[in-house]
């Protein structure tokens, strides 16, 4: 039986939704889920985010028909900022995950991140590690050891990340997206212990993800304003 988390749903007809899941067998799977919307009862059983499900589907095209779903355990409890962060992860995967890509790592990456969000007070390291790993899995990983020319980063030199190029050495150290080599190397080592590295990582990941997202808008970012 496939295990999955709900990423996104939109109404379809009277009591149905088109639900997008991240699964441990087929990456993102989109299904028509019937009798899941409206008054909760024997006929209508909702599908909720951050809950691990067992499910099965049928159909030959990209849009499947959900045949069965059952929760495996209680939903992961997120509230406040952590909830907004969880919705952000959902949107990222919904927009970027390949449909029917048989790689179980997608769901495990997501499951680990959501679990960490529920357990940790500061969500930023979890978000940055998720974004970096997601980019690597999509084939857009960033080399934090060398600049775009292939030269090793110098600790005291300043660099800026440029999408589709990499880290470029710059003279100006005051721009928001610029950081020294030491900070970028710390990012590569997944060390987000300082405010400087966390701020630089957030801006760098936003720039890198913008290439993958194109014109797709992440509504969850508006929740942080």
Image (spheres, helix red, strand yellow):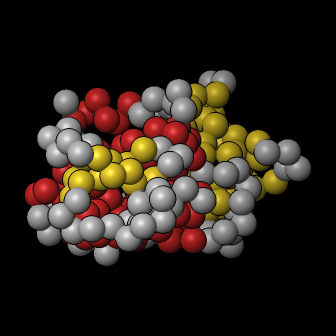
Residue at 31% across, 75% down: 189
Q: Residue at x 13, y 56 (%)?
A: 196
Percent across and percent down for residue 107 are 54, 66
Please determine whether, in this image, residue 213 is positioned above or below residue 109: above
Farthest left residue in view: 195
Q: Name the foreground residue: 143 vs 92.
A: 143
Vertical relation: 10 (above or below) 201: above
Q: Is residue 47 left or right of residue 68?
A: left
Taking depth in this image into account, of 31 and 36 the one nearest to the observer is: 31
Q: Nearer the viewer, residue 38 or 54?
A: 54
- Residue 67 drawn at (x, y percent): 73, 54
Pick the residue in front: 213 or 181: 181
Rendering coords of residue 5 (x, y %)? 51, 58
* Residue drawn at x 45%, y 29% as measured from the top left: 217
Image quadrant assignment for residue 110:
bottom left
Q: How many marks?
A: 0
Can residue 80 be seen here?
Answer: no
Single out the residue that lies furthest toward the top: 13
Vertical order, 62 against 166 (above or below): above
| Coordinates of residue 146 in the picture (x, y in percent) | 41, 67
Assign the C terminus to one quadrant of the image: top left
Quadrant placement of the N terminus: bottom right
Residue lying at 42% horizontally and 67% vertically, measured from the top left:
151
In the rendered structure, the answer to whether residue 21 lies left or right of residue 73 reads right
Left or right position of 179 against 188: left
Q: Residue furthest right?
A: 60
Q: Is residue 21 left or right of residue 194?
A: right
Residue 169 in sight from this viewpoint: yes
């Amino acid at each position: 039986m496939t295990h999955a988390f709900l990423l996104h749903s939109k109404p379809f007809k009277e009591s149905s939704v088109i639900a997008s899941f991240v699964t441990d067998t087929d990456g993102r799977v989109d299904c028509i889920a019937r009798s899941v919307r409206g008054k909760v009862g024997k006929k209508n059983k909702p599908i909720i985010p951050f809950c691990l499900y067992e499910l099965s589907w049928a159909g030959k095209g990209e849009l499947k028909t959900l045949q069965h779903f059952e929760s495996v355990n209680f939903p992961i409890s997120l509230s406040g900022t952590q909830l907004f962060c969880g919705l952000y992860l959902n949107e990222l995967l919904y927009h970027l995950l390949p449909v029917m890509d048989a790689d179980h790592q997608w769901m495990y990456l997501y499951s680990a991140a959501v679990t960490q969000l529920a357990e940790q007070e500061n969500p930023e390291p979890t978000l940055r590690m998720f974004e970096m790993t997601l980019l690597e899995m999509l084939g857009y990983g960033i080399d934090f050891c060398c600049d775009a020319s292939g030269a090793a980063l110098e600790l005291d030199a300043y660099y800026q990340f440029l999408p589709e190029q990499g880290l470029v050495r710059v003279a100006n150290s005051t721009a928001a997206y610029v950081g020294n080599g030491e900070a970028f190397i710390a990012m590569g080592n997944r060390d987000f212990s300082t405010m400087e590295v966390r701020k630089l990582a957030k801006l760098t990941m936003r720039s890198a993800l913008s290439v993958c997202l194109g014109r797709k808008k992440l509504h969850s970012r508006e929740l942080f304003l």
